[in-house]
Amino acid sequence: MRKNKIDIVSLGCSKNLVDSEHLMRQFQAAGYLVTHNPKRIDGETVVVNTCGFIADAQQESIDTILQLGEAKRQGKIRNLIVMGCLSERFRADLMEALPEVDRMYGKFDWKNMLADLGHAYREDLARERCLTTPNHYCYLKISEGCNRFCAFCAIPLITGRHTSIPMGGLLDEVHHLTTQGVKEFNVIAQDLSSYGTDLEGRMMLPELIDRMADIEGVEWIRLHYAYPTQFPYDILPVMASRDNVCSYLDIALQHISDNVLTNMRRHISRQETLDLLARLRREVPGIHIRTTLMVGFPGEGEQEFEELMDFTREARFERMGAFTYSEEAGTWAAQHLDDDIPNEVKQERLQRLMELQEEISLEIQQEKVGQTLRVIIDREDEDYYIGRTQWDSPEVDPEVLITKNKPLTIGEFAHVRVTEALPFELIATSI
């Protein structure tokens, strides 16, 4: 056990990871040695940044806390602190159920955490952080919260109303990160589409991305988690005209059936969704669209599910993930709809949908064989360098395995020729 050392364990999404990185900078300024998700926890204090989005993520957070509680009982750590989405949502219940936790905080009360440890929050460091990603890429969170209130989603219950981070602070953060060697910025928010509406009453995402693209050292900008309703179409000319804005958009559509979309309270129709996708592909040629779909939501019968399957075949998403509906306490769906689809039916539908997407993904990947692509090199293993194209977000999208026919540098760009395609990987040789 190392005194004056804090281990951060960050669970859940990349938005949580950004929070952990900002908190790490505050701890560092207070004089602590700080590490993130180390293979061997050896600090006297551990801070767990929890996820509370869906049941599986909640269980992972609880299991992690219990494991660390056992380590505390064995004398391997002294202080166990819990924060984040799960404790923001269920703090009272967790404090009663987890006596091994010394202190528990919500998602946003970092100042209280630091004060309880005997330190003051440094406002002058609010936009600084300790990166936990490789030095050449990072996540940039541009807003918090959500005003959409989809029937199934607990995020507004946890994070509150949509709040945009002022543009000046974000641009300063990007400038600072480029001086540290960051080349790739994965822009994230619960709802990118609404960025700026609470600041100036207008959609400011196009302006933000255009100004980011002007900053020297910014090589790639990639957009994650746009919302389809009231989509900021002015972002499309920016994507099409700026070489360092990737032709990539992560936009969760959830479903295509009008019946299901209405039950989900998505405020969009099937036809509006189709029109949106057509315009994305028309105005940004070569765009790769990543989406998330949900199966098993109340009201999804076999007809609605087959409609979703047909839509997936026709839309041919370059990237797609899916999950089954789980009832979340406090949401509109939990209060007004019966979760009456058996779990085995949900799982069978999920399997069918993902098998279809694997076929589509392989076909799209095969179209890249013979092409020369620009990739960024993430790491090296025994047989390959591993990189990504502009269409591949870290952790969730396909990678490019590059044969070692010439030396490449981690964190730098290279041009490769694709020689083979797998459903979720490309094989290439450097040129």
Image (cartoon, grey):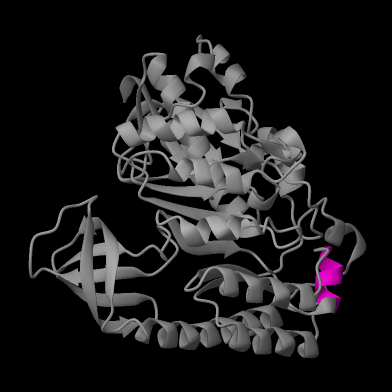
Q: Is the magenta region chiefly helix, strand or loop?
A: helix
Question: Does the segment drawn in magenta span residue 307?
Answer: no
The location of residue 242, given as percent across then percent down, is 45, 55
Residue visible at 69% across and 69% down in the picture: 254
The location of residue 359, given as percent across then percent down, is 47, 88
Is 344 positioned to the left or the right of 15 in the image? right
The location of residue 107, given as percent across then percent down, is 63, 34
**Residue 394's quadrant in the figure?**
bottom left
Question: Does the segment drawn in magenta span residue 260?
Answer: yes
Residue visible at 43% across and 21% down in the picture: 27
| Region in magenta | 259-265
Considering depth in this image, is 300 or 252 the residue closer to the camera? Answer: 252
Residue visible at 43% across and 35% down in the picture: 174
Residue visible at 33% across and 45% down in the picture: 183
In this view of the protein, can residue 100 be seen by the observer? no
Tag count: 0
Considering depth in this image, is 1 or 109 the residue closer to the camera? Answer: 109
Of the 4 image quadrants, the one containing the N terminus is top left
Considering depth in this image, is 32 or 169 the residue closer to the camera? Answer: 169
Up-down relation of residue 115 to residue 83 (above or below):
above
The location of residue 293, given as percent across then percent down, is 65, 72
Up-down relation of residue 291 to residue 332 (above or below):
below
Considering depth in this image, is 11 or 282 the residue closer to the camera? Answer: 282
**Residue 253's quadrant in the figure?**
bottom right
Up-down relation of residue 340 to residue 196 (above or below):
below
In this view of the protein, can residue 327 be seen by the observer? yes
